[in-house]
């Protein structure tokens, strides 16, 4: 298809790049070489045409002009042995990259700057020459999430996303235990100050077992994990994930629907033997709205609505945002609020009054109110229940849209999921800490308290087993101090 032998290097650069004289070279500093091995001849030709049509310069041979080597499906070891046989040497301005760099550059219509995740590293190069001496030694990382600072800046998303797919797949299959290993591995990577550059850098990290490391290795070598791809394409996983994305539908219901051969919402809704409860009915009714992430701006607008309702019931009560937004997330699946009431007993009545007010304002679409079952005499509890005993409610509320209105439906609002919790005043710090999350951060706080300090922590209290006493706390800082932990700010709890 392309001229094989060309007279001079100079002419070749322009001629090769302009098939039939149509394509102009736009990026003169970049010369690509696509490795044919494993990619195959026809795909290589196809990709070459594509790149040339977008103004890229390609060399059919691995000449000295080549700046970017692109490989697909080759193991790093194999590729580098071959490159070295061809006389190719690692240099500052030479890049050996995964096909992902190529595809991203094609979609961008220009060579995107290579990032660490794009590189296929030479495994033979001495690790020590690459380790960053200014970085903290990895072994200093704690295996407990409550001793790590994890902000929203995740430098290892490519790995953590993959590990979380594995975890999620196990959870959907009811294997909570094994899934935790992947959750923990992902959480450790989220706390790193920079992207991993080599598999070897995981060697001294806690919580990274052989399964997690194998996934990371595969991603380093091939840009993705075949196991993860397999799960993402798996019918069971996809269906279970779809079903459990409905408010009120958990893994058990999803599984029973899947086992009955149901694969889509249409099939679920037209199946006579399926009985939806009130929560699931609301989940389907408002699916389109509540499956869309809630923004921080929308969360702030909701805070004003909740505050107004709370204050109208009890002027001395205060409302704080908790959950993911308190941790600095930009989007959430709901908005969580915690209400502080200064007088004892108020926490039991405030939520019902707030719900009544939303009803009268015609903004309440769904409400599941759970009365307080909190009983001081039953503390401490030794079982770590998912739910606490406070007065709380799970709501769906109408939120007025700022600009555009849904002309088709003729409505100027969207449905949003809102959680409210109202603990007794002296329980506020424990409840706030528990509702701020993340789930893994909370889990590790409790595990740390129990295993390292002989104390029992939950959303209600902190109990010292050695002295048989409850440890009082007015603030989250008090709780960290009781546990002998450095204080971790809410935005550092995205474990
Ligand atoms: N939580 C709790 N008791 C409940 C409900 C929630 O302790 N009955 C805690 C969860 O453990 C979590 C936090 O409240 O740490 C917030 O829960 P959730 O809204 O589900 O998660 P977010 O972290 O806010 O994530 P998202 O942004 O998706 O809402
Ligand atoms: Mn939330
Ligand atoms: Mn919530």
Image (tube, rainbow, N blue to C red):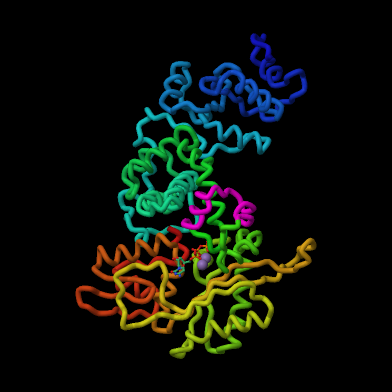
Residue 425 visible, this orientation: yes
Of 87 and 461, the residue lying toward us: 461
Residue shown at 67% from the left, 83% from the top: 360
The prevailing secondary structure element of the residues shown in magenta is helix
Q: Is residue 255 magenta?
A: yes
Position of residue 119 measured from the top left corner of the image (x, y, whole percent): 49, 34
| Left or right for 351, reference 204 | right
Image coords of residue 309 (percent x, y): 61, 83
Q: Position of residue 254 (x, y in %)?
A: 51, 54
- How many numbered marks, from 0 up? 0
**In the image shown, does 256 or 35 lie closer to the viewer?**
256
99 sits to left or right of 213 = right
In the image, is residue 239 part of the stretch drawn in magenta? Answer: no
Q: Nearer the viewer, residue 368 or 423?
A: 368
Asked if residue 88 is positioned above or below residue 108 in the image, the reply reads: above
**The quarter of the displayed image where residue 382 is located:** bottom left
As displayed, is residue 90 above or below residue 285?
above
Residue furthest front as drawn: 272
Residue 193 appears in the figure: no
Residue located farthest toward the left when viewing the structure as drawn:
466
- Which residue is depicted at the point 64% across and 10% down? 4
User: Which of 73 and 289 lies nearest the eye of the viewer?
Assistant: 289
Q: Residue 157: percent from the left, percent from the top?
A: 49, 47
- The magenta span reads 251-271
What residue appears at the point 29 percent right and 78 percent down from the top-left corner?
Answer: 471
Q: Quadrant of residue 389?
A: bottom left
Q: Quadrant of the N terminus?
A: top right
């Amino acid at each position: 298809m392309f001229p094989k032998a060309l007279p001079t290097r100079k002419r070749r650069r322009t001629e090769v790049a302009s098939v039939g004289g149509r394509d102009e070279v736009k990026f003169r500093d970049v010369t690509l070489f696509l490795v044919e091995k494993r990619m195959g001849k026809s795909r290589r030709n196809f990709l070459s045409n594509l790149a040339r049509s977008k103004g890229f310069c390609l060399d059919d041979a691995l000449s000295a002009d080549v700046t970017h080597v692109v490989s697909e499906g080759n193991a790093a070891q194999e590729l580098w042995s071959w490159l070295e046989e061809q006389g190719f040497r690692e240099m500052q301005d030479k890049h050996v990259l995964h096909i992902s760099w190529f595809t991203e550059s094609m979609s961008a219509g220009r060579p995107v700057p290579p990032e660490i995740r794009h590189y296929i590293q030479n495994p033979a190069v001495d690790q020590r020459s690459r380790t960053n001496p200014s970085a903290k030694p990895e072994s200093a990382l704690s295996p407990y999430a409550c001793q790590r600072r994890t902000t929203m800046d995740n430098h290892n998303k490519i790995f953590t996303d993959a590990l979380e797919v594995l975890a999620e797949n196990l959870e959907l299959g009811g294997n909570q235990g094994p899934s935790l290993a992947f959750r923990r591995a992902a959480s450790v990577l989220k706390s790193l100050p920079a992207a991993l550059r080599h598999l070897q850098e995981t060697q001294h990290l806690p919580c990274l077992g052989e399964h997690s490391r194998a996934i990371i290795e595969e991603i380093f070598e091939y840009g993705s994990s075949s196991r993860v791809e397999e799960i993402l394409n798996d019918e069971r996983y996809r269906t279970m994930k779809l079903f459990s994305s409905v408010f009120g539908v958990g893994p058990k219901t999803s599984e029973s629907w899947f086992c009955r051969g149901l694969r889509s919402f249409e099939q679920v809704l037209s199946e006579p033997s399926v009985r939806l409860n009130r929560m699931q009915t609301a989940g389907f009714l408002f699916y389109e709205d509540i499956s869309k992430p809630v923004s921080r701006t929308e969360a702030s607008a909701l805070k004003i609505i909740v505050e107004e309702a709370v204050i109208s019931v009890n002027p001395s009560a205060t409302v704080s945002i908790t959950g993911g937004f308190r941790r600095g997330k930009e989007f959430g699946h709901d908005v969580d609020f915690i209400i502080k009431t200064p007088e004892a007993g108020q926490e039991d009545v405030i939520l019902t009054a707030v719900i009544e007010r939303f009803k009268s304002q015609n903004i309440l679409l769904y409400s599941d109110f759970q009365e307080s079952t909190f009983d001081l005499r039953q503390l401490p509890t030794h079982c770590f229940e998912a739910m606490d005993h406070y007065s709380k409610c799970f709501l769906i509320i109408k939120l007025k849209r700022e600009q555009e209105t849904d002309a088709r439906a003729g409505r100027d609002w969207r449905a949003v999921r809102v959680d409210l919790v109202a603990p007794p005043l002296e329980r506020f710090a424990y409840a706030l800490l528990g509702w701020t999350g993340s789930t893994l951060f909370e889990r590790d706080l409790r595990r740390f308290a129990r295993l390292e300090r002989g104390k029992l922590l939950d959303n209600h209290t902190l109990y010292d087993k050695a002295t048989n006493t409850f440890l009082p706390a007015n603030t989250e800082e008090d709780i960290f101090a009781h546990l002998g932990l450095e204080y971790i700010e809410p935005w550092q709890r995205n474990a």
